Structures are given as structure tokens and as C-alpha cells.
């Protein structure tokens, strides 16, 4: 068995199902991130692992021990919440050591663990300060230190960086990765920010509607999503989707009419009847602006649109195109590749696009 094994896990609040048939295996020492939109069940799953919620059915096991009925204090887990939850009248030392003192651990052991954690988190010179004298990042490190001194088998983080500003979030992400490298402990992290998930995770669990949509390494999910939801959720800027209607499908490939105008020939063998609706997924960086007066390549998917917005990012720009069917797509391109209000045509190699059926399932068999 894996270090942490979840099987057929379900959770309902009264008659409302929140989690449905969760199966997940996490290896020892992995940094796993649960990611998905608000309300998808990721925090509820985290809370069930630590024992703050009771499963409706299914099992959770750590090192082959089923922990469904084990007291949270004895599960070997430690949780860091979105709120720092520090005691304002206590010093940093007292906040970090609070759990150990409540467990009546020996004073020498408490000091040893607190000083060790403080050194790892660069809090050793702040142990006599109170929370009001700390920055947001320092407060978050104190909350993490309170978890470290328990020496848990699994660290659980529930959106711990959401209260920090953008620059501090980036800094704290780097510090969490360094902490994971030093401790080598299994860490499970919840966020709705897929950029945060991709930069932190060894493995990502993408959730929607109380189910796991896909589980794997971040770049594997980016390159090879199982469905339209994962394709659209993983990656920044997000994947574009062009609506199309199949005109023919066979051994020679798939042909479709684009709702925004034009046609596409795709090197894909799929059992689709003429008239079936599909979505063609194209990453913004796959698209390029076709020079005026030049025809796109015959093996490209191309579409024309009006430049509705330009985001200049320095070395490159991000164009927002308004298409004929009132949809919008984004194009990552070089600076000054187009002007606001200009009609432009963009194209992407057909061999690099992804195709999804009307239900959102990925159609495989790409050339």
C-alpha cells in the first residue's frame, strides 16, 4: 500500500453529497496539492484526513493503519490553516510550543523542538516577540512552526498563503519548498490557485464537483489533460476553446466547421457522426499572428478576430481577440504584433491542439 491510502471515500452533509468515491494514493515524502474551484470539496477532504470531519463511507489509512475512528490528536497529522490563529498575548516561543505544553511534554524537549523549528523557519531571533510585532509572512511561519514541533507523519495546509500579498506569496512558496526539502515529510496542500499548485506540487489532484478529475505530475496534467475541465483549469493564461461542428470523421482525420468561421482539418481518428459538436483546445502560446496578406499553413487551425484588449507584459504581449461567434480567445505573442481594434488572423499547428467531445471528454488518437 501507499503511505496514505484513500479508498471509496464519500462525504455528505445531510442529503447533499460533497465528496463522491474518492480514490487516492500518496507516497511517503510527496508534496501533493489539491486544487480546484471553490466548493469542489478539497478542504473537506483535507479535514477528513486530519479528523475534523467524519467520512460518510470509505476508508483513510496511513502506513496501513485505517484512521477513520482514530482521535485527531493521535493520527500523526498537523494542520496549518488559512488563518494564522496565533494567541496575541503569547510570544512566538509560547505560540509554537503551545501544543507541546498542553501535552505536558518535558521542558527540555519543548525547548529543543522549538529552537530547531525556529532555526529552520528563520524565527530564532524572533522568539520573544508577540504576533503584533510580526509581518504576515512571519506570522505564517509561526503557524507552520507550531505544526513542525509536533513532528507529524503528514503536514496538511489549507490555503495558508491566501492572506498574503502577491510578492510575499511567491516568497513563501519558495520557503515551503525549501521546508519540504529539509524535512522530507509528506505534505498535502489545498489551494484554488492553479499557478500555486503547479509551482509547489510533486503531484496535483485536480478536483471539481466533489470528484477527482485527474491526478498526476503538474506538467503531465498540462500536456495531457483527461478532459476539458482539467485542460481549462491547468495553465496560465488558460487554454482557449473553439466551438466546432464535425463535417466528417474517418481514417484520414477529422474535419470540422468552426463556429467563429472557417474550417479545421485535424489529424485525429474518432468515431464521431457528422453534426456532432466538439471543442478544440489551443494554448495561448501555440497561437501566432499570421502576417497580413499571408495565408495560414494548410495544416494549421486558424481563426480571425478583432483585437479587443492588449496586455503588454514586457518582452511579450497578451492579445484578447473577439471572434465572430462572440467568443474570446487569448494569444501570447511578441510585443507590437497587433494594434487595438485591428482585425487579425491567428493560427496554431493542428497537430498540437486538443479535441473534446460535447460532454467534455478528451478525444485521443492525435497524430
Image (cartoon, helix red, strand yellow):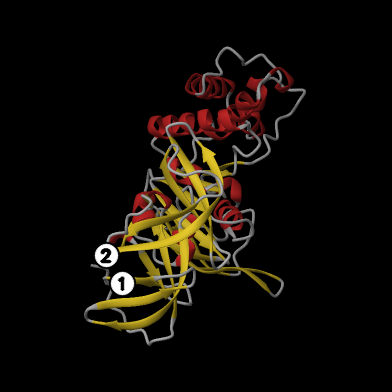
Can you give x and y, in whole percent of width and height, for residue 42 in the image?
57, 56
Left or right of residue 301, residue 166 in this image: right
**Total number of numbered discs in the rendering:** 2
The answer to whether any part of residue 53 appears in the image is yes
- CA distance separating discs 2 and 1: 9 Å
Which of label 2 and label 1 is nearer to you? 2
- Within the image, what quadrant is residue 64 found in? bottom left
- For the residue pair 314 and 92, the one nearer the viewer reads as 314
Q: Secondary structure at mark 1?
A: strand
- As drawn, which residue projects farthest toward the right? 89
Residue at figure coordinates x 39%, y 48% from the top left: 285
Q: Which mark is residue 298?
A: 2
Tell me what residue is drawn at x 55 percent, y 15 percent: 124
Picture coordinates of residue 135 (x, y %)? 66, 22
Label pair 2/1, CB-CB below 8 angstroms: yes
Q: Residues within 10 Å of mark 2 (few under 14, many from 20)?
A: few
Q: Which mark is residue 9?
A: none
In front here: 166 or 337? 337
Q: Quadrant of residue 349?
A: bottom left
Q: Residue at x 37, y 87 (%)?
A: 273
> Which residue is the extreme one toward the bottom?
273
Q: Is residue 164 left or right of residue 223?
A: right
Q: Is residue 161 left or right of residue 176?
A: right
**Disc assigned to residue 265:** 1
Residue at x 49% of width, y 64% of height? 229
Q: Please say if 336 is above or below 2.
A: above
Amino acid at each position: 500500500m501507499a503511505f496514505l491510502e484513500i479508498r471509496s471515500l464519500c462525504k455528505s452533509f445531510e442529503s447533499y453529497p460533497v465528496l463522491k468515491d474518492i480514490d487516492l494514493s500518496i507516497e511517503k515524502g510527496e508534496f501533493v496539492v489539491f486544487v480546484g474551484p471553490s466548493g469542489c470539496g478539497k478542504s473537506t477532504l483535507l479535514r477528513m484526513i486530519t479528523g475534523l470531519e467524519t467520512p460518510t463511507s470509505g476508508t483513510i489509512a496511513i502506513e496501513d493503519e485505517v484512521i477513520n475512528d482514530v482521535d485527531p490528536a493521535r493520527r500523526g497529522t498537523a494542520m496549518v490553516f488559512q488563518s494564522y490563529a496565533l494567541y496575541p498575548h503569547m510570544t512566538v516561543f509560547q505560540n509554537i510550543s503551545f501544543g507541546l505544553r498542553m501535552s505536558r511534554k518535558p521542558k527540555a524537549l519543548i525547548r529543543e523542538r522549538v529552537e530547531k523549528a525556529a532555526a529552520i523557519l528563520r524565527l530564532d531571533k524572533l522568539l520573544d516577540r508577540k504576533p503584533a510585532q510580526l509581518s504576515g509572512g512571519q506570522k505564517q511561519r509561526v503557524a507552520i512552526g507550531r505544526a513542525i514541533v509536533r513532528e507529524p507523519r503528514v503536514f496538511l495546509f489549507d490555503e495558508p498563503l491566501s492572506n498574503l500579498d502577491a510578492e510575499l506569496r511567491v516568497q513563501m512558496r519558495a520557503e515551503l519548498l525549501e521546508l519540504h526539502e529539509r524535512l522530507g515529510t509528506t505534505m498535502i496542500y489545498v489551494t484554488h490557485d492553479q499557478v500555486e499548485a503547479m509551482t509547489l506540487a510533486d503531484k496535483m489532484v485536480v478536483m471539481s464537483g466533489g470528484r477527482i478529475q485527474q491526478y498526476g505530475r503538474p506538467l503531465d496534467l498540462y500536456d495531457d489533460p483527461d478532459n476539458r475541465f482539467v485542460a481549462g483549469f491547468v495553465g496560465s493564461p488558460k487554454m482557449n476553446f473553439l466551438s466546432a461542428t464535425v463535417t466528417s470523421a474517418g481514417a484520414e482525420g477529422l474535419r470540422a466547421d468552426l463556429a467563429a468561421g472557417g474550417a479545421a482539418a485535424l489529424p485525429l481518428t474518432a468515431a464521431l457522426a457528422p453534426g456532432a459538436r466538439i471543442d478544440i483546445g489551443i494554448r495561448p502560446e501555440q497561437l501566432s499572428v499570421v502576417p497580413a496578406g499571408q495565408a495560414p499553413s494548410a495544416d494549421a487551425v486558424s481563426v480571425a478576430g478583432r483585437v479587443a484588449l492588449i496586455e503588454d507584459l514586457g518582452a511579450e504581449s497578451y492579445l484578447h481577440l473577439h471572434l465572430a461567434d462572440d467568443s474570446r480567445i487569448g494569444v501570447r505573442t511578441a510585443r507590437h504584433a497587433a494594434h487595438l481594434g485591428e482585425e487579425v488572423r491567428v493560427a496554431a499547428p493542428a497537430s498540437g491542439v486538443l479535441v473534446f467531445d460535447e460532454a467534455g471528454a478528451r478525444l485521443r488518437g492525435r497524430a
